Image (cartoon, rainbow, N blue to C red):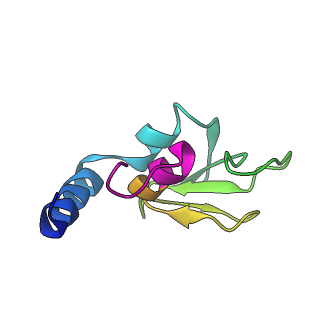
Amino acid sequence: MAVTSLISAAEEIRSRCNIVDVVSPLVTVKRAGSNYKGCCPFHKEKTPSFVVSEKKQIFTCFGCGKSGDVIKFIQEYYNLSFPDA
C-alpha cells in the first residue's frame, strides 16, 4: 500500500472509531470523571493506571508510559506493525 493511501486509511479509521468502543471489549475500564480507567493490558499491575480519554481519543498508561490513539492501541495490544493494525 502506498504511503499516502496508508495515511489516508489511518485518518479514516481515527475519524470513524471511538477509542472507548475499541478498548472496552479488550480491557475492563470504568468511567472516572470524563475518562475511563482500568488496569493496563501492557504490563502487570493491581492498581489501575491505564486511562482512556474519549474526548481526546487517546489512551495513556501512567505505569508503563505507553500511550497513543486507537491505531496505536491495536498495534500494541496485538503486537502488529502500523500497516497491519
Q: Is residue 64 left or right of residue 76?
A: right
- For the residue pair 37 and 80, the one nearer the viewer reads as 80
Q: How many marks?
A: 0
Whether residue 19 appears in magenta in the rendering, the answer is no
Q: Position of residue 80 (x, y in %)?
A: 46, 49
Q: Where is residue 50 shown, x and y percent of the image? A: 67, 54
In screen coordinates, is 85 left or right of 58? left
| Residue, far top | 25
Give the extent of the magenta segment. 73-85
Across and down, in percent, residue 32 comes to 64, 50
Q: Is residue 10 left or right of residue 78?
A: left
Position above or below: 69 against 75: below
Q: Quadrant of residue 2?
A: bottom left
Residue lying at the far right of the rendered structure: 46
At 36% from the left edge and 47% from the top edge, which residue is drawn? 18
Assess whether residue 80 is covered by the magenta stretch.
yes
Picture quarter containing residue 31?
Answer: top right
Residue plotted at (42% across, 64% down): 56
In front of the other: 32 or 60: 60
Image quarter where the N terminus lies is: bottom left
**Residue at 43% from the left image edge and 40% from the top image edge:** 22
Q: Is residue 16 left or right of residue 62?
A: left
